[in-house]
């Protein structure tokens, strides 16, 4: 299981956020998020939004630190990237 996390540099709701992704499947990502007790509502299209204070938890649980650019590349190469405004492909798991 390899899950990736980018640095908490994304502002929103008065705090900074990271993104947590898998380059294998959404099922793998959901399983990892469940281990971290992340709420399902934190899942958006192809990633989990992770508040900055939970970043160390994700890394300690085994998430690999990557840049935001690398994270997008990994998602795209795996065919798991879902851009805003696009419906999921048939058969995609949520």
Image (cartoon, rainbow, N blue to C red):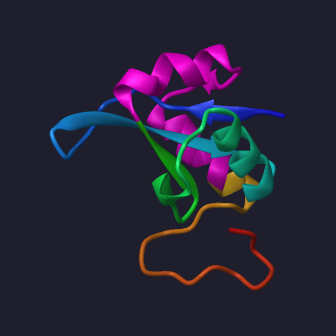
Q: Position of residue 61 (x, y in %)?
A: 68, 20
Q: Most prominent secondary structure in the magenta stretch?
A: helix
Q: Position of residue 29 (x, y in %)?
A: 70, 47
- Magenta part of the chain: 51-75
- Quadrant containing the N terminus in the rendered view: top right
The one nearer the camera, 79 or 64, is 64
Q: Left or right: 75 with respect to 85? A: right
The answer to whether one can see residue 23 in this image is no
Does the magenta-highlighted stretch encompass residue 34?
A: no
Q: Position of residue 89 (x, y in %)?
A: 70, 81
Residue at 43%, 80% in the rendered image: 85
Outermost left residue: 14
The answer to whether one can see residue 60 in this image is yes
Task: Please state the total of marks drawn on the protein image.
Answer: 0
Q: Position of residue 27 (x, y in %)?
A: 78, 55
- State which quadrant residue 58 falls in: top right
Is 15 located above or below residue 30 in the figure? above
Does the magenta-highlighted stretch encompass residue 55?
A: yes
Residue at 81%, 49% in the rendered image: 24
Q: Left or right: 60 with respect to 18? A: right
């Amino acid at each position: 299981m390899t899950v990736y996390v980018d640095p908490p540099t994304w502002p929103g709701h008065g705090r900074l956020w990271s993104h947590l992704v898998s380059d294998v499947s959404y099922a793998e990502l959901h399983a990892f998020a469940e281990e971290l007790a992340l709420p399902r509502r934190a899942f958006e299209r192809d990633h989990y939004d992770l508040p900055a204070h939970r970043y160390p938890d994700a890394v300690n649980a085994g998430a690999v630190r990557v840049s935001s650019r690398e994270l997008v590349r990994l998602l795209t190469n795996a065919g798991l990237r879902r851009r805003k405004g696009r419906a999921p492909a048939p058969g995609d798991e949520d």
